[in-house]
Amino acid sequence: MTNQFQIHRFAGLIRLQFAGNSIPYLISYGVLLILIIYLSLVGGLQLVLGFFPFALCAAGCLLTSDLFGKWSDTGHAATVLMMPASVTEKYLVGIIFGLFLFVPVFFAVYFLSAYVMLNIFHPPVSFADVFQGGKHAPEDPAVYFLNTFLVYLLLQSLALFTAVRFRKFQFLYLVLIIVTVFVAYFYTQYLMMMNMTHLLSFNYNYFVVEGKLSYFSLRHGGTYPEIILKPWISYLNKGMWLIFAAGMYVAAYLRLKEREI
Amino acid sequence: MITIRNLDFWYRRKEALFRDLNLELQQGHIYGLLGRNGAGKTTLLKILSGLSFPKSGEVGLDHWVPSKRDPFFLQEIFFLPEEIWFPNVRPEGLVRIYGSFYPEFDNKQFEDSLERFEVDRGISLGRLSFGQRKKALLAFALACNTRYLFLDEPTNGLDIPSKAAFRSLLAAACSESRIIILSTHQVRDLQSLIDHVLILSEHRILVNESLDMIASRLSFHHSSLPPDQPGILFTWKTEMGYSYILTNPDCELGTVDIETLFTASLQNQELSAMLSKRVEQRQFQKH
């Protein structure tokens, strides 16, 4: 077992992850702060909250690509692969920094900065307002953040896999895969909608965000009727996303074990 | 002991880098790994370090299989390639971050080596010059005291005093339990250190012989005029005159000119056959 996991080695890897990265972390925070100032100035509460999923996913995917891209780049890979620790330990460090540590830290930094900026540009704003997007809250904040986290899991696992699978242009491949997956996903829903409604319809919603499907119906005078889904369909859908993400994590781990330079 | 049996390796299937390569290296030696550009010196070190996997054949470092990258194996090996990334920390930061991963790491040895190399400890690695950075990493590699130490072009970028310092530090680091492999094009820098020569050419090990054995069979000479003695195996015109190799029937041990030996092995079939025959005989006896 000690050749798979040893706390002493694991702690060493965590220490290594922090070493020499303080400046990139500060620069990233600077970029995020500028973005929050812009969002606070232009859009206020709603835009700050609405932009959070995009900011989280983009920053997380970039960080993950950077963390695991080091396994592929010749100069970096020699250091990473030769480090006397198991692949499991090295992989776990990447997962901790790209997921378990990143999400809460990003969440705290984003909303704390947003709270300060919104209070400068649109005072007074309470903490609760920041999380709810003001009076026009789109839904229960807990559900909103849970769904955001689900989407993040999916995208981050894809970022992880592309960073490990490809030696070059990992981020480009990631964008390509995300676009492909989402087009395939929406097209499947579109076909399903056509089948369910027997109408000329265009689906613009997706399961993860809400427990309903909306479609554009010509027969009903160009309105947007809704089909309320049973909760289990929504859960099943989210479950599929989770299984997909888990599959990506496992595939990336197995790929890392075979990584060569 | 390092054992390679029937190793095949390629980056592209049609262009094999190694074909049925066999090699045995013993503890307590400093091996000089020589070869033309693209002969596969760095790749061989990568395979031994577990950074690249053989397409077929077996590679073993004592009881370890490098491709499994067992953490306890990785504690026993240090490979310093020409291009390597380390975090942007000061030299002592390397000890703090990496030192604990190597059980035999000797902090005093590291400090002494930095002193000998005259590395500025107050500057982080990213801000050091190429040569200074290389010296810091060499000092670290030596201080890890791993059983297997592989250095790729270790003297590239070092100034003359640093090369001398490196030679003395490496000589001090050599012990009966270690295998040190130096891959280099600059043999003159390391001639006094190497006690065993490995020459890679055309997918295989062309020469695998100790310098003592080579010196007992061949004698190396230099003259300003073209040599005309009988028994000349190889003559090489250099800017300084003529280097040539004779058979050594009296077995008097002289100095081996590794640069001339390398050139001769690649160009003179008879000489390389004479040296490689011994390798084959030795392998045959072992089997």
Image: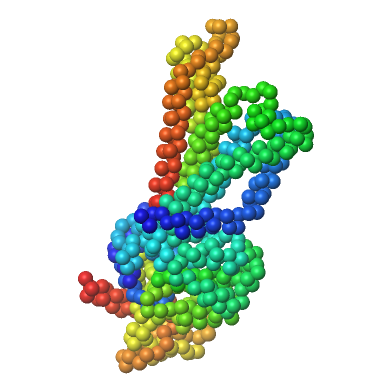
Residue shown at the point (51%, 63%) measured from the top left: B98
Residue shown at the point (71%, 32%) measured from the top left: A126
Q: Determine whether, in the image, residue B30 is placed left or right of residue A74.
A: left
Q: Is residue A73 above or below residue A201?
A: below
Q: Is residue A78 above or below residue A233?
A: below
Q: Determine whether, in the image, residue A92 is placed left or right of residue A222.
A: left
Closer to the camera in the image, A196 or B205: A196
Assign the N terminus of chain B to one quadrant of the image. bottom left
Residue shown at the point (29%, 75%) measured from the top left: B279
Closer to the camera in the image, A31 or B232: A31
Q: Determine whether, in the image, residue B276 is placed left or right of residue B121.
A: left
Closer to the camera in the image, B9 or B60: B60
Residue shown at the point (46%, 49%) measured from the top left: A92
Residue B181 visible in the snapshot: no
Count of numbered circles in the view: 0
Q: Determine whether, in the image, residue A120 is placed left or right of residue A87.
A: right
Assign the C terminus of chain B to one quadrant of the image. bottom left
Q: Quadrant of residue B67?
A: bottom left
Q: Quadrant of residue A53?
A: top right
Q: Position of residue A22 (x, y in %)?
A: 63, 54
Residue B118 visible in the snapshot: yes
Q: Is residue B57 above or below residue A163?
A: below
Closer to the camera in the image, B254 or A227: A227
